[in-house]
Image (tube, rainbow, N blue to C red):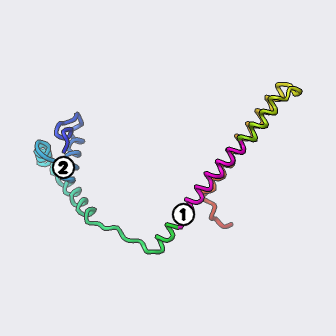
Amino acid sequence: MDDTMEEGNGMPPEERVRHLMMAEVDREISGKARLELESALEADPDLRDELETFQRLKEVTDTMTPLKPPGETWDSYWEHVYRRLERGIGWVLVSLGTITVGTWALWTAVSELIRDTTMPAYIRWGMLALIAGFVILFVSVVRERLFMQKKDPYKDVIR
């Protein structure tokens, strides 16, 4: 057990006793801390019962073995992993391509608008704001549709 447990570390007595009990359950208690825990257990029989409950729980969890799922479950699991990985990579590539082409197209459009001196400045800036607004709204709606489609609680409801 570390030195902070040996000292009081300024925690309330009830919390300190709980920490000491957990150290006992984990077999990490020693020295003065063990004596402190024993005196607390002697003073309060409910604490001793609680410690015994924790020790039994630790015994049970230490001896538990997880059930092995059937082979079909593993096959299905790996199919889902591969599918999600493929789709994730696909979405990353589509996103990168869209960002690249979209950035180029917007750069070209903005460059042309800025260079065109025959159009009044307020119209040029208005068109730039319009383009930026449409792009932001489009990306927002597409993103929301894609993410909400996964989490839609009614997608499997048959009408």
Above-or-below relation of 138 to 116: below
x, y percentage for residue 94? 66, 52
Q: Quadrant of the C terminus?
A: bottom right
Crowding at label 2, few (<14), some or many (≥20) Cα neighbours within 10 Å? some
Amino acid residing under circle 2: Glu
Residue 88 belongs to magenta span: yes
Q: CA distance from mark 2 to mark 1?
A: 43 Å
* 2 vs 158, nearest the viewer: 2
* 34 vs 28, nearest the viewer: 28
Q: Please name the residue shown 65% across and 49% down the image.
A: 95
Can you tell which mark lies on residue 154? none
Can you tell which mark lies on residue 28? 2
Crowding at label 1, few (<14), some or many (≥20) Cα neighbours within 10 Å? few
Quarter location, residue 64: bottom left
Amino acid residing under circle 1: Tyr
Outermost residue, bottom side: 71
| Highlighted range, magenta | 79-102
Marks 2 & 1, CB-CB < 8 Å contact: no
* 21 vs 74, nearest the viewer: 74
- Which residue has dot 1 on it? 82
**Is 144 on the left or on the right of 58, as rendered?**
right
Q: Please, what secondary structure does the residue beneath circle 2 have?
A: loop
Residue 58 belongs to magenta span: no
Q: Please name the residue shown 72% across and 45% down the image.
A: 101
Above-or-below relation of 72 to 91: below
